[in-house]
Amino acid sequence: MRADAPIGVFDSGVGGLTVAREIMRQIPEERITYFGDTARVPYGSKSRETIVRYSRQIIRFLKTRGVKAIVVACNTASAFALEELRPEADIPIIGVVKPGARAAASATRNGRIGVIGTEGTIESGIYTQYLQRLCPDAQVVGKACPLFVSLVEEGWLKDEITTLVARRYLEELKKSDIDTLILGCTHYPLLRSTVAGIMGEGVTLVNPAYETAVSLRTLLRENNLANDGHHKNGENLYEFFVSDAAERFKRIAKSILPFDIMGIRQIQIEDY
Ligand code: DGL
């Protein structure tokens, strides 16, 4: 496997761009092949079997693009599919949940940690498992916020309707004395200011993307896969694929990435 091969990053839609953006920031010399499963979003309300099947197809597709490692930039797929698919992938693969739990465990002072995510992620209990391994006395309060994904995919990042929905979802968590809140869905950092405004200054918001990019860098080094930083002049570092509605993806991506996506390709993911 060549060190100048791209890193595959995937999510159900635009949410994983919050992770891709962090990888671009921390490891700018790495190439990225991004896939957003826009035909089948949302993942959060689907069964484990379905998410495993979708993720397996995406990993197969990314491997046809010659990726050297994969980041599952989706909490739901990390919760449901990562461990099952890791042995099949035969390249290094990481998710966002473990790094997110690590970041929260070091941020909390009172051991009371909230997690917001999709129904799948919250019901899987995966954050609680990882957090209690890291700090056995941690008390974890989870809350599924399923409408957040649609609001983000709709591009309503700062909108009064989004604020109303967020208030409703977060009202229990506000009463639960947490001092740390994990944004346990990669779409949610896009609603960060809304969530922060409701939770107030006493609650630290954790975006697992930061810690994921740190873990990725370590993983690449350990596997002798880190890029040496040399690129041919003008070489495009990033490529984007979706399973549907490419123009729509491009439009929303504009408010997430620091550049406009030029080429974006639509593929038939069910063929993989
Ligand atoms: N962004 C994904 C996550 O982190 C999936 C959201 C969805 O499609 O429901 O869980």
Image (cartoon, rainbow, N blue to C red):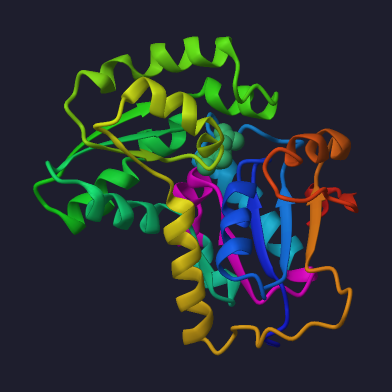
Residue 165 in the image: above or below residue 2: above
Q: Residue at x 49, y 53 (%)?
A: 209
Residue 63 in the image: above or below residue 227: above
- Counting every numbered tag in the picture gives 0
Q: Specify whether residue 223 is in view.
A: yes
Q: Residue 106 sits in which quadrant?
A: bottom left
Q: Residue at x 62, y 52 (%)?
A: 55
Residue 2 image offset from top left, x and y in percent? 70, 87
Q: Is residue 183 left or right of residue 237?
A: left
Q: Residue at x 26, y 44 (%)?
A: 128
Q: Is residue 103 left or right of residue 29?
A: left
Foreground: 176 or 64? Answer: 176
Query: Is residue 66 in the magenta section?
Result: yes
Residue 30 in the image: above or below residue 242: below
Question: What's drawn in magenta, residue-wise?
Answer: 63-84
Query: Is residue 41 in the magenta section?
Result: no
Q: Is residue 152 left or right of residue 117?
A: right
Foreground: 78 or 84? Answer: 78
Residue 96 image offset from top left, x and y in percent? 46, 54
Q: Residue 180 sits in which quadrant?
A: top left
Residue 93 image offset from top left, x and y in percent? 53, 68
Q: Specify whether residue 43 is in view.
A: no
Quadrant of the drawing holding the C terminus = bottom right
Q: Residue furthest front?
A: 201
Q: Residue at x 45, y 35 (%)?
A: 120
Q: Residue 156 sits in which quadrant?
A: top right
Residue 227 image offset from top left, x and y in percent? 65, 83
Quadrant of the drawing holding the N terminus = bottom right
Ligand 1 shown in quarter: top right
